[in-house]
Image (cartoon, grey):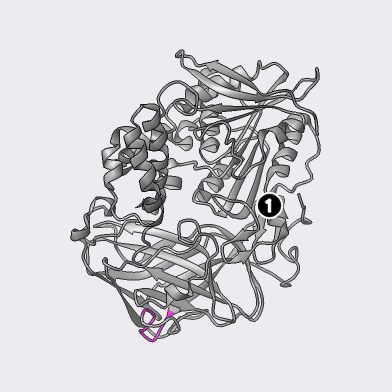
C-alpha cells in the first residue's frame, strides 16, 4: 500500500455558481493516477464506509480519490433535492476531477445506493453536455428505475423504508435551515417510523413537509420519476462504459442491479455483475438466520479494485464476469454470462385448509383435485412482513410461525430426493378472486428444513386496484441463486398484507397509502387450484448433480476468493 498525503478539502464550483465541498486522498510522490469519484448525501466523511473500505484504502492502491458532499448536504452549498441536481452536478464534477493534481486524466466513479444512482445520472449529464465521460463505474445496490426499484414494488408503496429514509434526510434539511425544533422532532420519530409506522401520513412528516420529498413520492407523478430515474435520463445514450454492477439477494434495489446490467450489456463496454448474500447494509457473513460463510465476510472491495485495475490500468482481472453467491453452499459461483434456467412447474393443491393450517397445502408436479382455499384478511391484524429485503428481521429469516397464522396460505412440496439449484426469478400464477374491489398479494418462497424451520429465500409483492384484479394473477418473485438441499422442502406462502413494509390495502379501491385506518374493510380471497385452475409456481431450475460441488452441471468457473 502506498503512503498518502494529508487530505485536501476543495470547494468545487458548479455551472450555476454553487460550490460543492470534497475531500481528496492522494498517494505521496510525483506519479499520476486515475481518479475515483464518490458523491453522497450523508456527509463525505461517511464515504460509504458502512459497506466499503475507507477512501484512504483505495487511494493507497494507486488512485486519487475524491469524495464530495452533494448539493445541499454536508458542507456543500445549495438546496438538496433528491436526484434532481445530480445530472448537471455529477457531469461537472467528472470534468473537474479530470484536471485534479496527481490525476492522469482518467476518471471513474464508485459508490453504493444513492451514490450509485447519481453515477448513472452523471453519465447522462456528461453525455448531454459533451463533458468528461466516466472511464468506468462501480455501482453497488442502486435503483435504475427510482419508482419501481426503490419507492414502490409491484405498485405497492414501500411504507416503512420510505418513511424512515424520508425522515432521516429531513433531519439534515431542517438543521441546515436552522429549524432545530423540527430536526429534534424528526430525530425523535426515527425509531418508531423504523419499527412500526402506523399511517402513510405520519404527523411528524406532515409538520416537516417543507424539508422532505416524501409527499412527492406519495403523489406518484410520472413526470417526477422520469426526471430522476437513470433509465429515463439514459434513454438514447450509448451505454458503452465499463461497469461493475454489485447487488445483494436481499437488497431493496436488487431489481435495479439486474435491470442496469441488462441495459448496459446491450452496449459495447465491459460489464461485470456480482450479487452477494447481503441486504442493503451490512455486508458480512451473518445474513439473518443463516451463516453465509467466510467467503461472504470479505465484502466487495477487492473485486472493485480488480475491476478498476482492469478498466483503468489494463491489468488482468482474476474474477469471473458474473459472480453469484449461493448462501446454502456458502460460496461464490462464477459464470462467463448470466446463467439461464429451465422452468419447473409445481401445482398448488389442498384439502381446503391451506390457510387454517400450514400442512394442508401442497406443491406437486401434477395437478391435484380441484379445491378452494379461503384467506380472510383482517386489516386490524394484518399479516406481517418478515425477512428478506423489507421484513423485520431482515435477510434469510425463519417464517414458520407466520405460516401458522390463519391469514396465510401455505403450500409445501414433499422432501426433495436430490438437491436443486434455483437460479433466476420464480413466478407465481394464481386463480384468485376477492370480494372487494382491491387487495394485495405478497408471495414468499421458503426452504423448509427437516426440523421445520421455513427459511425465506425470495418474495414478490403486488398491489391490485379496482379493475386490475382479474383472475388469474401473476406475481414475479425477486431473482435468486440458491441450492435447496436434498431432504428439504419448498414452500410457497401467500398473504393479503405485508405490514409494515407496505400499507394495508383497504379493499375499497383507494390507494393503500391514501386510506385511513377506519376505511379498511375485511377482505376474503378465494384461491382455486387443482384440475381446471391455473394456480402454479414456476421455478427457475438449473440441474445440480451433486449437493457438494458448486460447479457441477451449472457452467460455473472455478470459485475465486477475494
Indicate the quadrant where residue 418 lies.
bottom right
Callout 1: SS: strand
Q: Is residue 67 visible?
A: yes
Instruction: Give how far across and how far down residue 165 sits, in percent.
Output: 42, 44
Report the residue at 73% width, 72% height from top.
546
- Tell me the quadrant of the picture where the N terminus can be found: top right
Report the residue at 48% width, 60% height from top.
477
Q: Is residue 158 left or right of residue 58?
A: left
Residues 250 and 55: in front is 55
Residue underneath mark 1: 323
Report the residue at 40% width, 64% height from top.
442
> How many labels sit on residues?
1
Report the residue at 69% width, 54% height from top.
297
Q: Is residue 223 visible?
A: no
Instruction: Give how far across and how far down residue 82 sits, in percent.
Output: 42, 33
**Picture layout, residue 541 above or below residue 212:** below
Indicate the quadrant where residue 457 lies.
bottom right
Instruction: Say if the magenta span includes residue 54.
Output: no
Q: Main secondary structure of the magenta part?
A: loop
The residue segment tinted magenta is 349-355
State the residue lying farthest toward the left: 518
Instruction: Give how far across and how far down residue 134 sits, in percent.
Output: 62, 27
Instruction: Give how far across and how far down residue 545 sits, in percent.
Output: 72, 72
Q: Is residue 508 left or right of residue 286?
A: left
Q: Residues within 10 Å of mark 1 (few under 14, many from 20)?
A: many
Amino acid at each position: 500500500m502506498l503512503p498518502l498525503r494529508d487530505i485536501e478539502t476543495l470547494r468545487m464550483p458548479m455551472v450555476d455558481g454553487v460550490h460543492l465541498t470534497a475531500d481528496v486522498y492522494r498517494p505521496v510522490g510525483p506519479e499520476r493516477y486515475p481518479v475515483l469519484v464518490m458523491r453522497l448525501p450523508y456527509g463525505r466523511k461517511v464515504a460509504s464506509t458502512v459497506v466499503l473500505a475507507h477512501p484512504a484504502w483505495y487511494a493507497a492502491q494507486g488512485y486519487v480519490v475524491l469524495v464530495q458532499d452533494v448539493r445541499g448536504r454536508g458542507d456543500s452549498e445549495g438546496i438538496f433535492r433528491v436526484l434532481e441536481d445530480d445530472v448537471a452536478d455529477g457531469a461537472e464534477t467528472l470534468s473537474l476531477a479530470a484536471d485534479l493534481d496527481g490525476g492522469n486524466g482518467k476518471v471513474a466513479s464508485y459508490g453504493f445506493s444513492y451514490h450509485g444512482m447519481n453515477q448513472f445520472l452523471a453519465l447522462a449529464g456528461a453525455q448531454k453536455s459533451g463533458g468528461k465521460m466516466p472511464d468506468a463505474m462501480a455501482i453497488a445496490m442502486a435503483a435504475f428505475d427510482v419508482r419501481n426499484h426503490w419507492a414502490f414494488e409491484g405498485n405497492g408503496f414501500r411504507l416503512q423504508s420510505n418513511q424512515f429514509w424520508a425522515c432521516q434526510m429531513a433531519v439534515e434539511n431542517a438543521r441546515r435551515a436552522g429549524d432545530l425544533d423540527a430536526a429534534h422532532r424528526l430525530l425523535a420519530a426515527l425509531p418508531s417510523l423504523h419499527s412500526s409506522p402506523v399511517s402513510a401520513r405520519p404527523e411528524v412528516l406532515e409538520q416537516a413537509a417543507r424539508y422532505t420529498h416524501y409527499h412527492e413520492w406519495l403523489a406518484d407523478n410520472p413526470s417526477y420519476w422520469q426526471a430522476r430515474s437513470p433509465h429515463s435520463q439514459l434513454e438514447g445514450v450509448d451505454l458503452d462504459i465499463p461497469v461493475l454492477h454489485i447487488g445483494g439477494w436481499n437488497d431493496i434495489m436488487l431489481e435495479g442491479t439486474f435491470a442496469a446490467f441488462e441495459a448496459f450489456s446491450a452496449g459495447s463496454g465491459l460489464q461485470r455483475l456480482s450479487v452477494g448474500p447481503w441486504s442493503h447494509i451490512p455486508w458480512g457473513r451473518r445474513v439473518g438466520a443463516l451463516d453465509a460463510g467466510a467467503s461472504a465476510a470479505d465484502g466487495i472491495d477487492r473485486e472493485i479494485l480488480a475491476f478498476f485495475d482492469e478498466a483503468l490500468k489494463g491489468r488482468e482481472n482474476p474474477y469471473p464476469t458474473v459472480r453469484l453467491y449461493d448462501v446454502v453452499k456458502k460460496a461464490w459461483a462464477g459464470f462467463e454470462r448470466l446463467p439461464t434456467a429451465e422452468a419447473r412447474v409445481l401445482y398448488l393443491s389442498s384439502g381446503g385448509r391451506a390457510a387454517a393450517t400450514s400442512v394442508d397445502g401442497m406443491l406437486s408436479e401434477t395437478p391435484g383435485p380441484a379445491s378452494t382455499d379461503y384467506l380472510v384478511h383482517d386489516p386490524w391484524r394484518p399479516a406481517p412482513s418478515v425477512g428478506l429485503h423489507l421484513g423485520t428481521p431482515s435477510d434469510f429469516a425463519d417464517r414458520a410461525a407466520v405460516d401458522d397464522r390463519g391469514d396465510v396460505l401455505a403450500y409445501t412440496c414433499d422432501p426433495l430426493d436430490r438437491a436443486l439449484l434455483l437460479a433466476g426469478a420464480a413466478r407465481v400464477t394464481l386463480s384468485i378472486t376477492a370480494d372487494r374491489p382491491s387487495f394485495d398479494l405478497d408471495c414468499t418462497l421458503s426452504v423448509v428444513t427437516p426440523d421445520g424451520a421455513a427459511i425465506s429465500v425470495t418474495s414478490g409483492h403486488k398491489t391490485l386496484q379496482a379493475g386490475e384484479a382479474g383472475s388469474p394473477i401473476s406475481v414475479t418473485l425477486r431473482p435468486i441463486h440458491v441450492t435447496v438441499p436434498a431432504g428439504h422442502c419448498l414452500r410457497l406462502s401467500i398473504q393479503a398484507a405485508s405490514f409494515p413494509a407496505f400499507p394495508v390495502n383497504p379493499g375499497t379501491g383507494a390507494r393503500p397509502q391514501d386510506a385511513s385506518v377506519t376505511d379498511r374493510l375485511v377482505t376474503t380471497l378465494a384461491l382455486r387450484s387443482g384440475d381446471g385452475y391455473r394456480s402454479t409456481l414456476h421455478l427457475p431450475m438449473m440441474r445440480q448433480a451433486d449437493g457438494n460441488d458448486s460447479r457441477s452441471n451449472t457452467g460455473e468457473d472455478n470459485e475465486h476468493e477475494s
